[in-house]
Amino acid sequence: MSVCVSAAAQNRPEPQKLTPFAEAAAVNQIDEYEQRLWTQAKEADQAIDKADLLLRQQETDAYLQSIADKLYPEFTGRIALHVFRAPQANAFCLPNGSIYINQGLIARMENEAQLASVIGHEIAHFTHRHSYANTNTVKSAAAFASVAGLLGGGIISDLLAISSITGYSRELEREADAVGFQRMVKAGYDPREATKVFTLLRDEAKALDSKEPFLFASHPKLQERIDNFARLAAKYAGGGDAGVERFDAATLALRNASLEMDLSMNRQAVVIQVLENAERRNRFSREADYFLGEAYRLRGKDGDEKLARAAYERALAKVPEFAPSYRALGILAMKNKEFGSAAQHFEKYLALAPTAKDRAYVEQYYAMVKDKLK
Amino acid sequence: MRTPEQRCGRGTETPIRARASQGASLRASVRVPLALILTFALSACAPIGWQRYEQATEVEHASKNFKVTLPANWVRYNQAQRDVIIITRDGLRVQQIMAAYAPHDKAFDKIKKISAETMLPAELAELQIAEMKALGNLSNLEVLENTPTQLGGLPAFHVLTQFKNNDGLVLKIEMVGAVNAKGYYLMQYQAPDLHFFLRDRAAFQNIAASFIPQ
């Protein structure tokens, strides 16, 4: 694959002479070198699909697609948006117009305008043919080859490696920022939200002391991009649509699933970062307090048990029929030798969750605490 | 400090007509799946070959913390440091059974978590699943079963998972794990779901049943 990319790179037109695609039909006029990239991208699409790495929530996919169509109406039907089942805050674009937004990134956004700024940026990489322009640099050729070669390697690692981090030069990232921003404004979104995406992700990475790549983390320097966006946004003081309600409704299932994914992958710090803010927590489902409690329990620092218990109790008060809160409180009580309270909670859990996968564990705990009470 | 011979040394065994064989090309070919699924760090030492057991053989882990009985006609993949006992019958891509031990402070290296003697089996299972997901970047790992069981008389978890690899092949991984004062023990079986998983599941269950902590 890398040989193929290199060959394309040697004979391709100068990147500065590449004309952006003006509309969907223009993509039929690509040369053979670009066609090779597209073929490799299609293979990558197929590999991702085959490895079951897409979230496939019809409602969410349709929502993302509607934002893309709103931003780039002339490309309706040509650009495909997908939710990539990965917890990291990232997104990437393949040369053929396949855009992958990580589940984790969508879950971190606060409104539709923020999501639109990400989608607008990624689509600009496609319409302005940045993958093709990029193939003349050794770094990017290697990065793309790693994607194209993903059939034999660690698929997620390879994809993360090119997702807006190693893929494009400073100039191309700047261009994608500018184009995406213009589209966002034209579509009526509040441009100030674009700046917030950067600061949100930067602050989160800082708070989590995260070393993992996240969208917009590299070229050009993050602060420089924040400053650029702030300047651009200042020109549009009139504001615009943030789309909070639409975003909340369309992504609720995804955001809840994302909490579970983060917890199951030992990413409790992310869950705490997102849910500790009560206002933000209220925009998740009513069980969000339970997930926050789980995150404290998994973190296990001094004082976390108390925080977890309080969170579970809040969840119980809000959603008394939500069984996992009872299990969690039962385990805490059992560990603290409060066997009476533990028995009550386990009993309630078993009554509410007759088909739970972990029922056998809880039955065992229940028998244990009942034994202690004898 | 241990000598290279000690570091790469073999555990106490009672092999019957055990025979080592060299298989460089096969060893090379198994690195990818091993890297994907093994949940304990493998030795940095080079592998030292294959060893066939023509009769059921009781082997002791290099740490001397447990023994298991390996079935006849299976082949052991001899990792130099023996942190992990790995066996297969037809090749590691077809099926592999692993038995491993780690001290508490090394139990879940990838996610930087430790185990403790007081942990509930369900808590161990939760960490084991997170460790697997982190090791293989397996965001598509699905937990099919998670139930309590016993391992050598210790309260243990039993977890059955599956995921699709890059070729779209569904792989199943079954695990049984437990802790005691000495550390964390894990038995693991992996095979493609199609044709193979059910075929050798009984062998895994027999090995797990033979587990004796020491």
Image (cartoon, coloured by chain):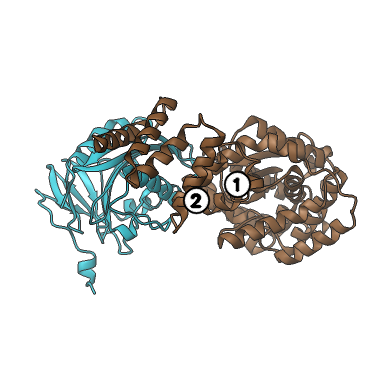
Regarding mark 2 in the picture, which secondary structure is present there? helix
Location of residue B172 with respect to A105 vertically, above or below: above
Residue at position x 41%, y 48% in the image: B132
Q: Chain B is drawn in which colour?
A: cyan
Q: Which chain did the renderer colour brown?
A: A
Left/right of residue A193 with respect to residue B150 in the rendered view: right
Q: Residues within 10 Å of mark 2 (few under 14, many from 20)?
A: some
Question: What amino acid type is highlighted by mark number 1?
Answer: Gly
Quarter-wise, where is residue B45 in the image?
bottom left
- Viewer can see residue A149: no
Q: How crowded is mark 1: few (under 14 residues within 10 Å), some or many (20 or more)?
A: many
Residue at position x 85%, y 42% in the image: A187
Are dots 2 and 1 on a single chain? yes
Left/right of residue A299 with respect to residue A363 in the rendered view: right
Give whichever of discs 2 and 1 has the lower sequence position.
Answer: 1
Return the x and y of residue B57 as percentages of the image width and height: 13, 46
User: Which residue is labeled 1 in the image?
Assistant: A104
Return the x and y of residue B32 as percentages of the image width and height: 41, 51
Return the x and y of residue B12 as percentages of the image width and height: 13, 57
In front: label 2 or label 1: 2
* Label 2 chain ID: A
Regarding mark 1 in the picture, which secondary structure is present there? helix
Q: Quadrant of the C terminus of chain A?
A: top left
Q: Residue B65 carries which label?
A: none
Question: What amino acid type is highlighted by mark number 2?
Answer: Leu
- Viewer can see residue A251: yes
* Label 1 chain ID: A
Residue at position x 69%, y 39% in the image: A81
Q: Which mark is residue A307?
A: 2
Q: Distance between the residues labelled 2 and 1?
A: 24 Å
